[in-house]
Amino acid sequence: MGPDDGALMERVRRGDQAAFAALVGHYQDRLFTVAHRLLGNRADAEDAVQRAFLNCYLKSDHYEPRWQVSTWLYRILTNVCVDELRRRRIVGSAVRPPDEGPTDKPVQHLDFRRALERVPTEARMLLTLRYVDGLSYGELARVRGISINTVKSQLARGKAILRKVLR
Amino acid sequence: MDRLDELLAAHFKVDRAPGKLASRIVERARHAGGKGLELLDEIQITATDRGVCLIRAESLASPSSTKARRLVEQARVELAEYLEGKRTFFSVPVDLSAVAPFQRDVLETARRIPFGEVRSYAWIARQIGHRQAVRAVGTALGRNPVPLLVPCHRVLRSDGGVGGYLFGTRVKDGLLALERSTPVLQGCTTTRIVCRVGCVHGRHMSPENRVIFASVADARSVGYRPCKVCRPLADAMAN
């Protein structure tokens, strides 16, 4: 987002609580949406967003001004979500049932959500970031630490799977 | 824009975050004084098929088998939860088979020190039947292959001094402070079950349904039963 983010992060780095609150207020909706779509339920999404912001606060010393704040936050959040998805696989804990989707056409969105579950995690993550916040290929590559060509091929792969399942 | 793009755009439309989320985050940040999670960035973990066998602040060889890699991932997840104050016990197994018998006795004894409590080097020496071997106990703990999982940071000097620690005494102080400020038992007001903090069941408890207990006896006195998964009562009796 805007040029003020860097200044806000600088204040957060100095321990300014008001700046941190402003940062949270500015990004919470988008981060929550990304986490909700990736993890499938609101409770886990809330937890992931809290952990991501807390990591951002505690590790604000590591933030470098040349990074975009949004890219950095999305990177932290997607890592938290990957950890959570991995934890579910390893610990085998009961996963909370998915919530109702964001929908005015429930049946159609239910099909779409099931189709999305067939998409591998990395591609699903890229699709989520691309469509929630319209991140460019370059930004997606920086968020996930992969090359732009990998971003393109993963997105294409994800969409191809969706097309096939929804056909 | 084709039909799939439209569906994606509709599915990923930005939702409003829950009303109190921002205030909860700011509140958590305010109380999060410790920088424990940084420790996790510094350490490397390796495992055998039987359990985690080495944790060090230096690069270690990656485990060769899939099972061992899974144990390393499990250990990372559990350690992250522990350092965030969300876990009071570890379920990942440790493999002490490569350790000499005396050191294994020391480590097994240290492993039984309850979360949030401390013991002295002399206490461990007495427990393993070598009263005079206090310095040897210190050496054995200093070479603990799996710090954190075997909580050698809960062992202090008899004169109250903090003693040494593999990751430095500042980290030892930080871990003890973290444990003092983390509740050990939590109950759920809807299920009336009391769990150790970090139990799988406890993770899904809503904050408004969560109640903290000092002991299993306290929880029982108001009608709660111990969780059958994390078994807080068995843990209390073992100690």
Image (cartoon, coloured by chain):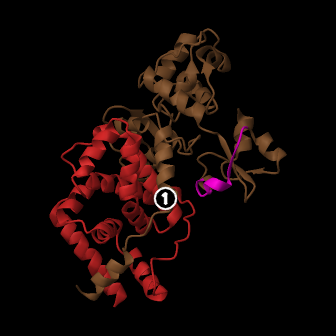
As shown in the figure, which amino acid type bears the numbered disc 1? Glu
In this view, the residue farthest toward the bottom is A167
Residue position marked by numbered label 1 in the rendering: A46
Is B233 on the left or on the right of A105, as rendered? right
Badge 1: chain ID: A
- Percent x, y of residue B39: 40, 35
- Bounds of the magenta span? B203-214
Task: Confirm whether residue A60 shows in the render.
Answer: no
- Percent x, y of residue B33: 46, 34
Q: Looking at the rendering, which quadrant does residue B8 occupy?
A: bottom left
In this view, the residue farthest toward the left is A149
Is B175 on the left or on the right of B45, as rendered? right
- Percent x, y of residue B104: 55, 27
Color of chain A here?
Answer: red
Q: Is residue B171 magenta?
A: no
Letter of the chain in brown: B
- Percent x, y of residue A37: 41, 69
